[in-house]
Image (cartoon, rainbow, N blue to C red):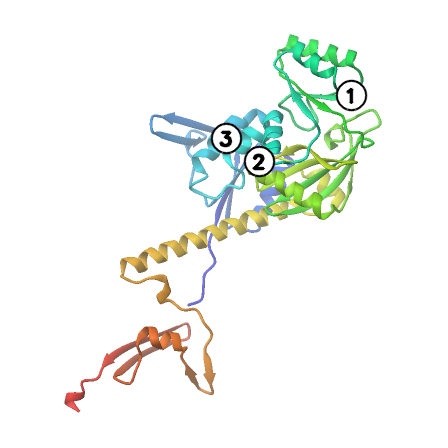
Amino acid sequence: MTPTKNKCKAALISLGSTSSKWTLDAMKKYFDEVDNINLKNIEINFSGEAAQILHKSKTLGQYDCIFAKGSFRYAPLLHGLTALREKKCYMPIDSTAFSVAHDKLLTQLALQQHNIPMPRTYQAATVEAAKSIMKSMNFPIIMKFPQGTGGKGVVFAESYASASSVLDALTALRQPFILQEYIDTGGTDIRAIVVGEKVVAAMERKADLTEKRANIHSGGTGEAVELDAYAKKLAIRVAKAIKAEVCGVDMLISAKGPLVIEANISPGLQGITKCTKVDVADAIAKHLYARTSGMKIKEHKAEAAKLLQDEGLNTNDTLITSLDFRGARVLLPEILVKKAKLDEEFEYEITARPDFLSIKKFQIDRKKE
């Protein structure tokens, strides 16, 4: 029988950025149906043993694939949404990734646990402890807020005095902070986009002359770059460490090799698409469809196996093979003959159509002959 295409329904849940719109358009090329859902309209109703995801006060529909993304401000909502749906459909980003990737400290912890090389990083509970740590650090240093994207929340301190002033200000704001050694790369870094098991695009970002941050949103410029095999594997390891199949990985190329500084599970696509000429949105959509379709095929096979078991059969009773044609005749495979116990003691009823062939056997009553 001719196989039919697996129909797949997907949803993109996002804040409606340009990158999200590009991804939505790309997904429509592969999926049979794609719903565009604004993350701001999502609510979660927790009640005893049950939990309900609502969209505009109505129960969120059923999907084969949900691609949820958004800024760090919505990390708890994204975590909850994904945790409730990730066992019911394909979601490329694990629920825990929203908490990990949107917190620089938790990101550093995940990277350390997976032996990912990164700049030396410190966290202190108090300003006094941080100042004590800084006395053993070489300046300049980088100071970061745990949350923030696009280079926001990153401060460059040239001396102990300037770093101390920043710490005093952070104390007034009651903001936690991270201290990190500064790696001089001439104001450049690498942004790689990982989709599944592949780096689909990479660019070198160059900071503006007045900036230390190379982020495009901070005025940096980008240029396409081809990463070596090690750097590609490193980027893929980072994505796996934070459990995200779609991920932006930022690296510094130091004298010791590439060092990872950040992972972004909602990377902007405009800059990297423009400078690399790679349709990153299409690569993401193609991966989402392939994974969703693959999961549906597995589900269908599992359902078929269950039906066979209910009938007292098993999947080994089905054989997919080529046939040995001898002119207008066909020789059946030996394993099939043995399995069906075909021999001359039986007569056979054969039903044939262009896409179907059935053989039913009847035992001959020799006493009547």
Q: Three-letter amino acid code at disc 1? A: Asn
Judging depth in this view, the residue of 77 and 229 nearest the camera is: 229
Residue at 62% across, 11% down:
174
Decide if residue 21 is in sight here: no
How much space separates mark 1 and mark 2, taking CA atoms?
A: 30 Å
Q: Position of residue 240 (x, y in %)?
A: 58, 40
Q: Can you identify the residue that label 2 sits on?
A: 242
**Relative height, residue 108 to residue 158 (above, below):** below
SS for tag 2? helix
Mark 2 is surrounded, within 10 Å at the Cα level, by few (under 14), some (14 to 19) or many (20 or more) other residues, namely: many
Q: Three-letter amino acid code at disc 2? A: Ile
**Relative height, residue 178 to residue 312 (above, below):** above
Residue at 46% across, 55% down:
6
Say which mark, if any, is on residue 138: 1
Judging depth in this view, the residue of 318 and 218 nearest the camera is: 318
How much space separates mark 2 and mark 3, taking CA atoms?
A: 13 Å
Q: Is residue 87 left or right of residue 350?
A: right
